[in-house]
Structures are given as C-alpha cells and as structure tokens.
Image (tube, coloured by chain):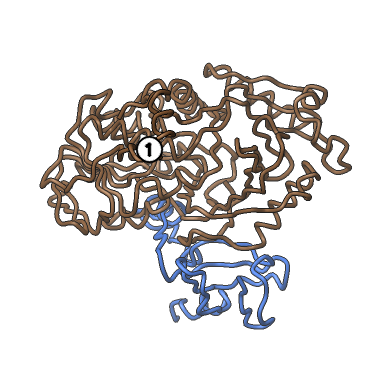
Chain colours: A blue, B brown
Amino acid sequence: MIINHPLLGPRDAAEFVYKGDASLINRPNWQADDAAELFHEYLYLRDNPAGQHRELWYHEQGDRSWLIVTRNTLTHEISNVEFARDVALAERPKK
Amino acid sequence: MKYSGFKVIKEALTGHKGWKPVWRTPKPKNEYDVIIVGGGGHGLATAYYLAKEFGITNIAVLEKGWIGSGNVGRNTTIVRSNYLLPGNEPFYEFSMKLWENLEQDFNYNAMVSQRGILNLFHNDAGRDAYARRGNSMMLAGADAVLLDQEGVRKMYPCLDFENARFPIKGGLLQPRGGTVRHDAVAWGYARGADSRGVDIIQNCEVTGMNIENGICTGVETSQGTIKAKKVAVCVAGSSSRVMSMAGMRLPIESHVLQAFVSEGLKPILPGVVTFGAGHFYVSQSDKGGLVFGGDIDGYNTYAQRGNLPVVEDVCEGGMALMPMIGRARLLRMWGGVMDMSMDGSPFIDKTHINGLYFNGGWCYGGFKATPASGWCYAHLLAKDEPHPVATEYRLDRFRRGAMLDEKGVGAQPNLH
C-alpha cells in the first residue's frame, strides 16, 4: 500500500506503524460518572467495519507525524489522508 | 459411505465413478433447535459434537459459501498445545487429546501426523522463558522437552546454528504436536454431522438476526427466514460483521495473515520448527513443499490477501533460520482473515441476548483449537454453562480485568 502523505507525498506503508481505529483520538471524559464503562468501550470495543475505515497511521520511519487514513478494508484502496492533529483541532469544541 | 481398502482398489479399477457425495444438500426447514452460523471447522465440529456427544440433532449449519472455504482451508495445518496461561493451556491440551483420537472418532482420514513442534531459543532469556512454558505445559498434562543445541542439531542439522546475530542455543519440543490435513478436518466433521441428521446448508448467507424483547428467535438468510431456539455464531474472521446485525460491538479487529508454500523438495524437515528471534514457522508437507508463515500484516482488513512488506519480513525470518530456503522457489501464497482479539485469546460465550451465542476471536490459532472449540461450544449450547476448560473465554473479561494475554502486550490486536 502507498500512503499519500500530506507533506511528503506518496510513501510506502511499511514506513508507518498502524495504530488502529481513528476514534481512539477521542478519549472519554475520565471525570464522568460512568468513566469505567466509557474507558472499557474506548479501549477494547471496535466497530471493525467491512468497507470504509478511518484509521491512525504513525510515520515512525519518516517525519513522526500521526495521520488519519480513510481506507477501504475490502479493497485496501486509500481515499483520503489527513493529519490527525488537524482533525483533532477541527473536532475540538469551540470555547 | 463406508471406506475400505477393497473399495479403493475397486474404484481405482473402474475409473473412480462410484464415489458419492458424503453429505446431503438439504433445503432449510422452517425451524431448528440450533442454528450454527458458519460452516467452517469450528462450526462443523460444533454440530458434530452436539449430535454425537450431547444428543441434539435438529441442527442447521448455515454457510454463505461452501463449507471449509474460510480459514480451515487457509491455515498452515499446525496442531500443538504449548501455551503458558492456566486459562489457555488445559483447553489446548484438551484439543490435542481430541486430535489424537479424531480419525478413529469420526472414521475419516485426516492425516493427523504427530511429527513434533520445536520452538527455538537463541539466548539465555529465551531458554528461561521456554523452561517456564514447558513446566506450565506439563502442569496441564501436556508433554514438553527442553533441548540443548546438540539435541536440536540431531533433529534439524540443516538449521543455521552459528548465525552471528541469532545462534540457535536449543529449543522447546512438544513431541505430540504436529500437522493435520486441514480440509479433511472440515469434511470429516461435515460427514459425521450429516450422518447424524444435521442439515448442512451451503450458499446460505445470514443477512439479519431476528431479535425480539432481548430474545433471538432466528435468522434472516438468503434462503428465507429460519427460526431457532438457539443461534450459535461461529464465523471467525467476520465476527464483527455478523454480530453487528445483533447490534453488538466486539473486542476484535479483523486482520490478514499470509501463508506460503514452496515448490516440492526432498524430505528436509521432519517436524514443525519456529524461529525464536522473529516470527517464522515452517513445516514440510507430505508432497514436499515447505509450508511457512509469520506475522499478520497488521492493519484492519477483510480482503483475503496481504501486501509485500510482510512477505519480505517472513522470508527474512526464513533466511535467518535456514539459509537453504533461499534456493527454493515460492509456489503459492494466500491470506486469511483473522479475528484478532484484544488479548490474543478467543471467546466461547453466551451474549446478553437470550438464545444468541458467540464463538470467535481465535486470532491465528484457530485451527489447532478446532476439536476443543467445537466440543466446548456444543457443551455451552447444550447445557448453558461453559465447559470446565473454557471458563475463561468470556466476552466480559476485559470489563472484569481478567485478560488472557499470553504475550503481555495489551489491547493492541496487531501485536498479538
């Protein structure tokens, strides 16, 4: 697989480490009343879809950036690559 | 159908025209006592043991393709019971004992070959870990022999003992481990289940679960609605897809594991060997091909094929262990989709939905578990309580902090 890095262009997926479902960037609120249950779901349960999947790839053998890659788990086709930082900032609630 | 030496000779002389299908092709009935979703090794074994050991024969096995088309036909055929943890080892040893008696039990040639499995170590820490594992195995009634370098050299003189980086210092041998003809396992169980009245329904995909008021009453399929008192899902590789029809999220990611076969060679490896400094395991088939594999690719996928970086990684492991493998040409390679669970161990459990049962999360160790998985799942379905050797395989073990993490790497499915 070739991952089209936003800054570095097309890079071999072997340079990256796969870090799982992109929802892992949204940690639950540890002060919530049901925090134990929320963290159980966050840490252990996965949607694991067949089809489009948003997932984290860490560019360990490159610029150490974290990317969110949208990839089809049935065909391995990659349709979108973005910086995890940009996604996290865009999703952060506004003050 | 009866098999005999006389029949083989008669068929050989008459053009093999007298062999008949060994299981029926029934139409689904409206209702069954138990529906097993998934006609792989585990599903067929479950049906077989339910019928034979627990007296429940009003069973349908629903398979979306043809039986044995999933991982039971895609593995590297290794059977062993060399686990460490008390929650795992008795289960796999139970499986090993069932393997040893399997062919007599279902009267079908599965080519069970106890040629031994040898896990190599390359340093003192590796020796300590394998001594501990061997002790753990023996505590559960399994067999284990710790070999020094000379012991390994006698069995496998072709290995690279003086490798500068990873010299072979010895190994942990399980003499009762070995290989089994994987397709014949599926066929033998299918034949045994069918002859006891189990309906094996191929080309019948489950498209929905009928759940009312927290009770599962049956399934929707490509061949219509089928009712059942109990629905037993057994579809490792596709567990998340099927259980999502019941609204469940599982502690599982689907990953691809690749396997490889070389061209046929003269006998060189009498048993199964695993490299201790990387992930590489190899045995030699009766046709002479070296059957080998290594790590999973490491990303979520449902495609039954992998990518080239892992091919390179596996072959590097092979070259480090036995450089002569570099002279052999690769004949075939393929991939199978694994249920990678969050601690590397499987599930055989009821769900919170009455009448819905789940078996999955076998990672890449499902084949060796086939007989025990079927037996324990049948036990659970028949008696509604787990078999004594499968009490730890619960879906809620992460919530309880009772993980069965053989490697101790945590909730990282691609590291198990």
Instruction: Please identify the residue farthest to the front as the structure is shown.
Output: B13
Describe residue B316's horizontal placement relative to residue B10 as left or right.
Answer: right
Instruction: Please identify the residue farthest to the left as the structure is shown.
Output: B30
Q: Residue A69 at what x, y percent from top left? A: 53, 73
Q: Amino acid at mark 1?
A: Trp
Describe residue B48's horizontal placement relative to residue B185 as left or right.
Answer: left
Give the chain letter at badge 1: B
Identify which residue is drawn at 45% across, 27% down: B95
Residue under circle 1?
Answer: B187
Circle 1: element type: helix
Identify which residue is drawn at 32% across, 47% down: B38
Q: Residue B350 at what x, y percent from top left? A: 28, 39
Q: Quadrant of the N terminus of chain B?
A: top left
- B337 shown above or below B198: below
Q: Residue B169 at what x, y percent from top left? A: 81, 30
Q: Quadrant of residue B354?
A: top left
- B341 shown above or below B90: below
Q: Residue B235 at what x, y percent from top left? A: 36, 48
Count of marks placed on residues: 1
